[in-house]
Image (cartoon, helix red, strand yellow):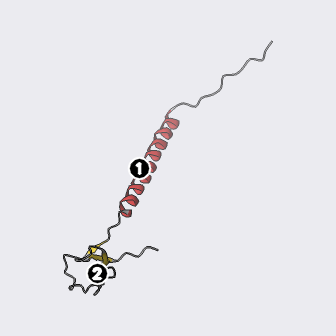
Amino acid sequence: MVITMRTRICPFCKEDIHSQALVCRYCTRDLPPPAHQQIRKQTSYYWLAAITAAGIIVSGAAFLASEFLRERKNWLTEPPRRPKPQNPPD
């Protein structure tokens, strides 16, 4: 389970710290109150990979369905093929 948290950068040591921290855990200095411009959320691009994978799966299924329907149309319109009778060898 991945837990994302909002972080900000310590103005003194430039490390990522929790957005509501009062003291930096790296340089142990008192921090100014968080401003809205300093709060940064860790971004995740897993949603982009999930949407891409879903698009590939849906387009593949649509392609297979269209090819099946095209082949089915050929089965229905072509006359049935009957094997030619073979003459027994003499």
**Which residue is most to the top?**
90
Q: Secondary structure at mark 2?
A: loop
Q: Nearer the viewer, residue 57 or 44?
A: 44
Residue 47 placed where, x, y %? 37, 63
Q: Distance of mark 2 from mark 1, alpha carbons?
A: 42 Å
Q: Callout 1, which amino acid?
A: Ser
Describe residue 89's horizontal placement relative to residue 10 as left or right: right
Q: Quadrant of residue 52?
A: bottom left
* Residue drawn 74% across the image and 17% down it: 87
Q: Is residue 42 above or below residue 62?
A: below
Mark 1 nearby-residue class (10 Å; few <14, some 14–19, many ≥20) = few
Residue 44 placed where, x, y %? 35, 66
Q: Is residue 71 above or below residue 9?
A: above
Describe residue 70's horizontal placement relative to residue 41 as left or right: right
Q: Callout 2, which amino acid?
A: Ser
Q: Quadrant of residue 81?
A: top right
Residue 14 placed where, x, y %? 26, 73
Q: Nearer the viewer, residue 84 or 39?
A: 39
Name the residue tied to disc 2.
19
* Residue drawn 26% across the image and 77% down it: 10
Mark 2 vs mark 1: give the one in front: 2
Name the residue tied to disc 1.
59
Mark 2 nearby-residue class (10 Å; few <14, some 14–19, many ≥20) = many
Q: Secondary structure at mark 1?
A: helix
* Residue drawn 70% across the image and 22% down it: 85
Residue 45 placed where, x, y %? 35, 63
